[in-house]
Image (cartoon, rainbow, N blue to C red):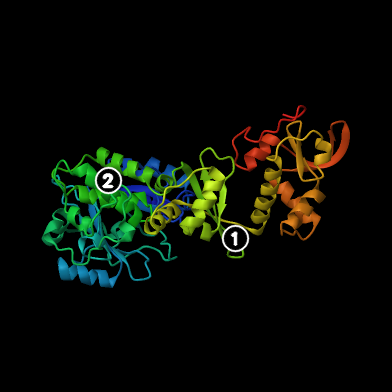
Amino acid sequence: MSLVETAIQYSQLGWSVFPIRAIDDPHPADPSNDKRPYVKWKECQKTRASEKQIRSWWNKFQKARIGIATGSISGIVAIDFDGPAARGQFEAKICDLPDTIMQNTGRPEGGFHALFKHPGNGYDIRPAVGKHLGIDGIDIRADGAYIVVAPSLHKSGKQYQWGKIDPVEHGLDDLLDMPKELLEFCTSPSRYKFKDAPKATQDTFDPEQPKNKPGWVNEILWGVKEGQRNHCCAKLAGYYLRYFSGDEDQAWISLSGWNMRNKPPLEDSELRKVLDSIKAREGINNFSEVVGKSLYNLEILKYPDGEVRYNLYVEGLDEHIQLTPEDLIQHRKFRTKFMVLTRTVMKPVKDETWFRVVEGALQDAQVILMSEDETHIAVVKRLILNDIKRGSFDNPEDHIENVCVIYNNQVHLYLSSVARHLQFQGTRFGSTKELGTVLRMIGFKNGSSKINGKVLRTWRIDLPDFEKTCFLDPGIVAVNLPDTV
């Protein structure tokens, strides 16, 4: 049976179905999240999709995996076990696991889902991460969460598979009610002790609350009263975002579970507002606070030879700052380089704080795998851009012997001049043909050009196109030649 037909069969069981991204098609902005939906699935928590909508989704995303919104919308609660050890903890601390509908998730450790009927009757069972409830390796997937189901692929390469009972073939007669102990655990976790809960460490450092004392997570995780909710919500949102390496969906699931223990709970809209606000301030924004300058991006460049560099983008600075690992990690080296390039004097900061802030910024940073061609392209772009920024020249037809000139809103250069300067800087190409290939990849064309009345054979590119390929704002490169721009 095809994925779309299986998805329709699940829908006919009363389950709310939606498409999950294929393993080989991660979201560009969130490649580490292997279970991100193709669509905005919040509506699927309230309304089940029609067969027409499901067919439309899978017609567009043919390799999509099948996601099911858990909770009252589908009438199910899923307990997600990492493996047999997690099941042992569950049975030791809560109750024996009944022989309900189960599926193997494909985790190498033997992970599986156990499905139960949602109790209904106004129950709103929020998701929770077992590690924070003293039971490592177990997650509760209920209202406001979802699971991936068979025959979808797990990132391990194995398929999700139903156990003895396949709900498509056998129906839901064997879907059992939640045992009383499990229902109490899901709705009133405060009756259980935090024996295995994580302690507050350097990783839980919250820049907004520098005086957090050890154990603060445990203290507020059971819920707080009105007047404390927003403050604690902000602290916990930052903690979860760091704990889940910026995964907003996981942070939302955990934060929602915590919110149900508050008296009274915050509205979902208010909870989302707080999470979005904290998400916006995490990572690069915390870094900005420490350096005293607005930063808008940090890139990690990984080169074929194993070398790593970092590109730091600063508001108001035309060119990014490239850093070595030592520049970034060693606060004093960073401070000196940053001050020279931005003319900004950083305030002293403790090494411990510096490491935390840098680590937070790196978690949000985009990793760019540099191929050999991309490495050469970056070097050539930098050489040309630096030469352009030296200023205007009265005789552009003569200056082209150096690296390049701008004339009639075009960048012109000689291949031999660029090769000579690159060699001087320590970058060698196998041949001028190889360098020409790189110039073409940037967008340069080879041909005759007339500069100040003199016909020259140059490599040229329109200035706006060069600015675009260097990710510069239009017009940022300005050379005041009377006959140029």
Residue 162 in view, yes or no: yes
Query: Dot 2 corresponds to which residue?
Result: 234
Three-letter code for the amino acid on which mark 2 is drawn = Ala
Query: Regarding mark 2 in the picture, which secondary structure is present there?
Result: helix
Residue at mark 1 to residue at mark 2: CA–CA distance: 38 Å
Residue that protrudes farthest toward the right in the picture: 454
Q: Quadrant of the N terminus?
A: bottom left
Q: Are marks 1 and 2 in contact (CB under 8 Å)?
A: no
In this view, the residue in front, 2 or 274, is 274
Residue drawn at x 21%, y 61% as measured from the top left: 133
Query: Regarding mark 1 in the picture, which secondary structure is present there?
Result: loop
Query: Dot 1 corresponds to which residue?
Result: 303
In this view, the residue in front, 136 or 117, is 136
Residue drawn at x 48%, y 43% as measured from the top left: 296
Picture coordinates of residue 222, whole percent (x, y): 16, 54
Picture coordinates of residue 178, whole percent (x, y): 16, 58
Instruction: Give left or right: position of 31 versus 235.
Output: right
Label 2 neighbour load within 10 Å: few <14, some 14-19, many 20+: many
Residue drawn at x 68%, y 45% as measured from the top left: 386
Picture coordinates of residue 120, whole percent (x, y): 16, 48
Q: Based on the displayed image, in which of its 4 quarters is residue 457 positioned?
A: top right
Residue 47 in view, yes or no: no
Three-letter code for the amino acid on which mark 1 is drawn = Tyr
